[in-house]
Image: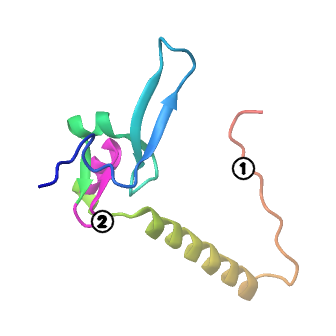
């Protein structure tokens, strides 16, 4: 008979230690959200976190709410979609644009 000791679902988890001083020291098992890559403290997650049944991995609270509406959206899929969109844009720019590369436009955010 085997027993699981510690936080559930921590296989392959990292370990967080905040050792600024001994009075406010924090320790926790951590994993990353399968959908956005956010760091999840597993002790807080087990009280009300979400779970992706398709990937069998924990999700942060915001991705858990989003997955109820849109289903499983893995982080690697989002990265691949962004890369493919960038490649399509570069090909379009090459096919329709001049021989010289188009200079990047500045994006103004309101801060200096």
Q: CA distance from mark 1 to mark 2?
A: 37 Å
Of circles 1 and 2, which is in front? 2
Q: Judging from the image, what secondary structure is the residue with disc 2 in?
A: loop
Out of 67 and 18, give the one closest to the viewer: 18
- Residue at the image position 72 percent from the left and 44 percent from the top: 108
Q: Which mark is residue 86?
A: none
Identify the mark at residue 107; answer none if there is no mark. Answer: 1
Q: Quadrant of residue 73?
A: bottom left
Residue 55 tag number: 2
Indicate the position of residue 24 as horizontal and vertical percent values: 47, 15
Give percent across and percent down for residue 26: 44, 24
Question: Residue sitting at 24 percent across and 46 percent down?
Answer: 8
Q: Image check: 13 left or right of 85? A: left
Q: Reply yes or no: does residue 33 show up in magenta.
A: no
**Residue in front for this viewpoint, 37 or 88:** 37
Q: Quadrant of the N terminus?
A: bottom left
Write down the region rendered in magenta. Answer: 53-67
């Amino acid at each position: 008979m085997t027993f699981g000791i510690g936080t559930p679902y921590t296989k392959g988890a990292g370990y967080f230690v905040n050792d600024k001083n001994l009075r406010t020291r924090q320790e926790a098992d951590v994993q990353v959200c399968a959908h956005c890559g956010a760091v999840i403290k597993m002790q807080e997650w087990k009280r009300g976190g979400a779970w992706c049944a398709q990937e069998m991995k924990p999700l942060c609270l915001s991705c858990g709410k989003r997955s109820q509406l849109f289903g499983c959206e893995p982080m690697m899929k989002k990265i691949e979609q962004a890369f493919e969109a960038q490649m399509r844009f570069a090909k379009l720019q090459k096919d329709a644009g001049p021989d010289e590369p188009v200079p990047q436009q500045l994006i103004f955010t309101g801060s200096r």
